[in-house]
Image (tube, rainbow, N blue to C red):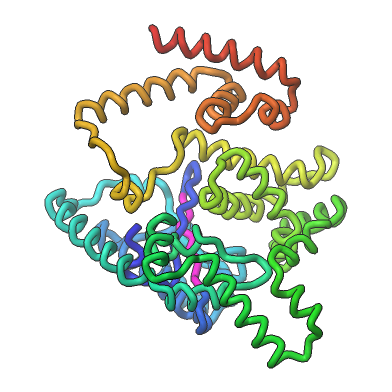
Amino acid sequence: RFQRLISDGGRFQVVAGNAATWLVYHPRQGRLAFSPHQIEAVLASVVGFGSWVTGTRMQPARVQFSQPRLGPLAGYQTVFNCPVEFEQAFSGVLIDNSVLDQPLPQADPQLAQVHERYTTARLAALSINSASAPEIRRWLTTRIGPVLPRRADAAEALGISERSLARRLRNQGQTFDGLVDDVRREKALQAVADSSSSLPEIAEAQLPGNAIDAQSSQSPERVAELIHHVAQKDRQAFALLYKATAPKLLGTVLRILRDRAWADDVIQDTYLKIWQRAEQYQDGKSSPITWLVSIARNSAIDELRKHPAGRTTNSDELDEMPGRQSTAQEQLEDQRAANKLNHCIDQLEKDRQDMVRLAYLNGWSREELASQFEQPVNTIKTWLHRALKQIKRCLES
């Protein structure tokens, strides 16, 4: 939430594990190349800040970089105080969960409230000043390619809701789709003027979707081969595997979450797991696509368990929603009811839990559930009926 107050050069992603948690850094490439030295400085700052805020020297379990080593290994070990690896799938710091669970020695609730008010005001000011048509146009220019940027991506980059972005552009006499068309037209004209490519080649490069479609027709044998190369930490194979399979995995996740931005985040987590678990794939047990889809599906369902009512609504959208504000007592009662419902759902068998949440919280049809769980429609109906009776008994107890 507060990353934009520090820099818009990248974002952090938290990937939690049973014993340790990855803090992954994703640099945002702009017109200027993102220096590998900057990535090293960011992760060093994370360790330095962790040491300062806890009052003890932080010792990560591991640090890794997607880039080659830039200096003597001893220097890295002095800074990070742990094993350091290079040319990996991502750049990040692995921190033991016991370190993250420690209370902060100098926590001050009153000071935290002051910081909250100040940072909220600063974020609001940044959002108001940044959603201009020229800035959106510059952002689009760096991202237009075979796959078109979405309005949700632009809104996330600016830290505002899609509706707020649409309204602010409308106030300037613009629309997001109109800006996309303008930028695509300008890039096509520039390509005609500056390139020796033929017009069909230029048109092919400007049309959305072609790059991924061309890569997504890989045979199962080729996908299996790529997975085996990924198990050997082959970054080029990993990139090819992503291009070949991302559309199918995204479709799987979207059918579960019904939210594109949320699905995009889960797909990132999915491919991180694929990179980490590729050596576990065995040719004889399942097809490579089935193995990949199961990782994506389980990641999406895990997210659904964590956020059964969907992810928290953006504060920008909440500000624009009319209606009466609920009282503290009503909010408490709603929370208690939600907690009890989730407790009762958790008493079901694991596949029944997923089925109930997909059916009644995400609106899946019985046919979609039958396809997802590979069962006849009538069986799905019977299972849901029995699950609802069990939940009802639990709620009444």
Residue depicted at x 69% and y 32%:
372
In the picture provided, is 366 more to the left or to the right than 171?
Answer: right
Q: Residue furthest left?
A: 110
Picture mark count: 0
Instruction: In the rendered view, tell whether residue 372 sits above or below residue 388.
Output: below
The x and y percentages for residue 197 are 78, 86
In the picture provided, is 288 more to the left or to the right than 105?
Answer: right
In the picture provided, is 361 more to the left or to the right than 5?
Answer: right
Instruction: In the rendered view, tell whether residue 130 sits above or below residue 232.
Output: below
Q: Which is the main secondary structure of the residues drawn in magenta?
A: strand
Instruction: In the rendered view, tell whether residue 70 sits above or below residue 373.
Output: below
Residue 71 appearing in the image:
no
Residue depicted at x 62% and y 44%:
253
Q: In the depicted view, which residue is nearer to us: 251 or 196?
A: 196
Residue depicted at x 63% and y 54%:
271
Magenta range is 21-28
The x and y percentages for residue 45 are 36, 70
Residue depicted at x 61% and y 70%:
87
Which quarter of the rendered picture does the C terminus lie within?
top left
Q: In the depicted view, which residue is nearer to us: 5 or 66?
A: 5
